[in-house]
Image: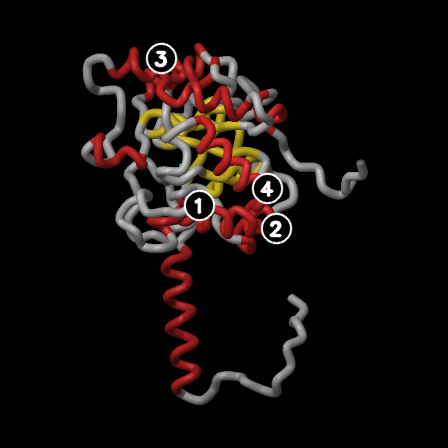
Amino acid sequence: MSVDPQISRMTAPGIIARKGGEPIVCLTSYHSHTAALVDPFCDLLLVGDSLGMVMYGMQSTIGVTLEQMKLHGAAVVRGSKKSLVVVDMPFGTFEESPQVAYRNASYLMRETGCGAIKLEGGAPMGETIRFLTDRGIPVVAHIGLMPQQLNTLGGFKSQGRKEGDRERLINDAKAVQESGAFAVVLEGILEPIAAEITQILDIPTIGIGASSQCDGQILVMEDMLGLNPWVPKFVKKFGALGDHIARAAEEYAKEVKSRTFPAEEHVYRAKKK
Ligand code: KIV
């Protein structure tokens, strides 16, 4: 079998090898062009089902479909070269049985070319994670605040304050590791618990709103770029793209209206930067 020597992507074992070492840099990505821009600086790009809310204006991730994940997953694989691309399993595509999960996860891997999938759920998803990993599908688990369980959680609430939370979260973390997950996203988990889980596990923890104690961090790209007017409290904005885009559109509108817009001939050759 021949492989392209130009393309050497991060792999699931490569991510495991970073446990306790250099922090793992992860961002969500939904498109080819933004994937290409951030890929050189990342280890892992997650095509998160957050795209339903961020890109499609949905109220939650519940309505996201497998077809949306397929199209955006394939775009991110095409746009990137070195990061491991992980595609989220949307709500209703993996919970029913390990067999249903396998069918949908293998479809996503085949159609997108991604290197792994992510699914939400701790101990109750153990059997499914084992079924997938035994059959060649690398899995990132996701515990703590699980947006797909919004309706049973009663909102986007951080985890770890209630009695029994610590034990449940540690149990979930151990269960997904024992089932073969190669990394676990800890979302909205109080710092002492996130730190304890990171200490206990042999696989890397990737935090989002779960303190800097994790082995890596992930943010929604549009949040950290300043494209969303509302972002969770823990998110640092590294850019102000929302303002930048609005200003550019305003400038463009002015030029069009004043007929100063430089629309010369129909030549579609790319301009050199
Ligand atoms: O869907 C998503 O973007 C995620 C990350 C926030 C971890 O699950």
Image quarter in which the N terminus is found: top right
Under mark 1, the amino acid is Leu
The structure residue drawn at horizontal position 50% and vertical position 50%, both measured from the top left corner, is: 72
Whether pointer 2 and pointer 3 mark residues with C-beta atoms closer than 8 Å, the reply is no
Residue named by callout 3: 171
- Which one is earlier in the sequence, the residue at label 1 or at label 3? 1
Q: Nearer the viewer, residue 224 or 50?
A: 50
Secondary element at tag 3: helix
The structure residue drawn at horizontal position 32% and vertical position 25%, both measured from the top left corner, is: 144
Under mark 2, the amino acid is Arg
Residue depth check, mark 1 versus mark 3: number of the one nearer the observer: 1
Secondary element at tag 4: helix
Disc 4 to disc 2, how far (Cα)?
14 Å
Residue named by callout 2: 78
Disc 4 to disc 3, how far (Cα)?
32 Å
Q: Is residue 202 above or below residue 230?
A: above
Residue 23: x %, y % from top left: 53, 26
> Residue 66: which numbered mark, if any?
1
Q: Toward which corner of the image does residue 82 lie, by quadrant?
A: top right
Q: Nearer the viewer, residue 148 or 244?
A: 148
Q: Nearer the viewer, residue 256 or 154?
A: 154
- Which one is earlier in the sequence, the residue at label 2 or at label 1? 1
> Residue 110: which numbered mark, if any?
4
